[in-house]
Image: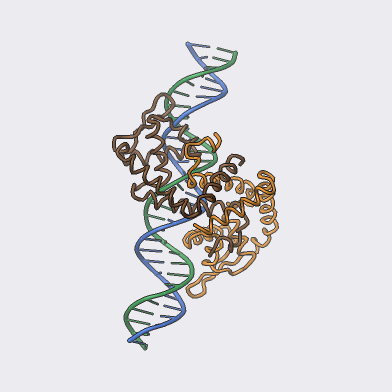
Chain colours: A brown, B orange, C green, D blue
Amino acid sequence: MKTSECRYCTCPNFLAGTVARKIEKMAAESWKETGLAPSHAYLLLLTLEEPGIQAGIIAQHLQLTPSTITRLVEKLEERKLVTRVSEGKQTNVFPTQKAREMKPLLKKCSEDFHEKYTELLGKSDSKQFIQYMTRIADRI
Amino acid sequence: MKTSECRYCTCPNFLAGTVARKIEKMAAESWKETGLAPSHAYLLLLTLEEPGIQAGIIAQHLQLTPSTITRLVEKLEERKLVTRVSEGKQTNVFPTQKAREMKPLLKKCSEDFHEKYTELLGKSDSKQFIQYMTRIADRI
DNA sequence: ATAAGATATTTGTATGTACAAATATTAATT
DNA sequence: AATTAATATTTGTACATACAAATATCTTAT
């Protein structure tokens, strides 16, 4: 059934959730090769770009709560992809060697996803979607 | 931190998730008075509009998987808001008297949310957002 | 009429996320 | 210096959601 035929197709909350789930599924497919869920992949990329990044900063960049970051980092730690170093009250997250070796693959998957997405929506629509969503996010 | 300043502010998956969480929070606030989470509220409204609606049809309208519907209905059943009547291999969901009494409140909350949302984004932007999201959802 | 396949739902399990409370550290006030 | 307040993170718990497998029913083919 098409979303436009659904009972709550005019409810922004319903729509936002539906779209998010669909896009996440697409993203998960792209990142499958890494064995990581999209949010884990983002977090890992953050640590690769800025080794030792503070947990709270990660939370801000991913727009997730601190407790969620703790949980995501735990998972990545189990897979030996990051290590936590606490420094006073704060926690710094470093990528491991294994993660560093994975970087090219992560980049590739990220690009794959962007391509797949752009192809699906067309260049102008996909660009517009990003602008639009950003604007919305900043106002809510 | 504004979403437009985040590291992955150009990633559609990140954006979609962020926006969905923010809108859901807004919606949850509006539905607080009912004690129901937004998705429970939608489901309940569906059963009120079409008593005896089949579980699978609910799944299609809410764009959720059948197993999720089972779980949502279970919760509503615990609160004595719906009852399940199985008819052969299918399950029909009926609202209880308690749910029927709740209908005006549900409607009110739904309208509250729409107003709050429209006020926040402005009339034209909020309308555009809906059109845009619907189009995206149908193509993914 | 029975076996095989198709359909609808539920169950078991796992994941990502959040909230509230707990903990640990640092800063500020008296 | 000691108490209080502020800040950063973690823990306990709960929830919405999904996937895969199990179950129950119905349909079709032989």
Left or right placement of residue B103 versus residue B16 in this view: right
Give the percent coordinates (x, y) of residue A22: 48, 54
Give the tally of numbered discs. Answer: 0
Give the percent coordinates (x, y) of residue B44: 60, 60
The image quarter containing residue B42 is bottom right
- In the rendered image of this protein, does residue A49 appear above or below residue B99? above
Q: Residue at x 53, y 66 (%)?
A: B55
Give the percent coordinates (x, y) of residue B8: 47, 40
Q: Quadrant of the C terminus of chain A?
A: top right
Give the percent coordinates (x, y) of residue A74: 37, 39
Residue nearer the viewer, A50 or C26: A50
Residue A85 showing in the rendered view: yes
Q: Residue at x 62, y 68 (%)?
A: B51
Residue nearer the viewer, A102 or A75: A102
Q: Residue at x 57, y 53 (%)?
A: B133
Residue B20 showing in the rendered view: no
Left or right placement of residue A3 versus residue A36 in this view: right
Residue nearer the viewer, A28 or C18: A28
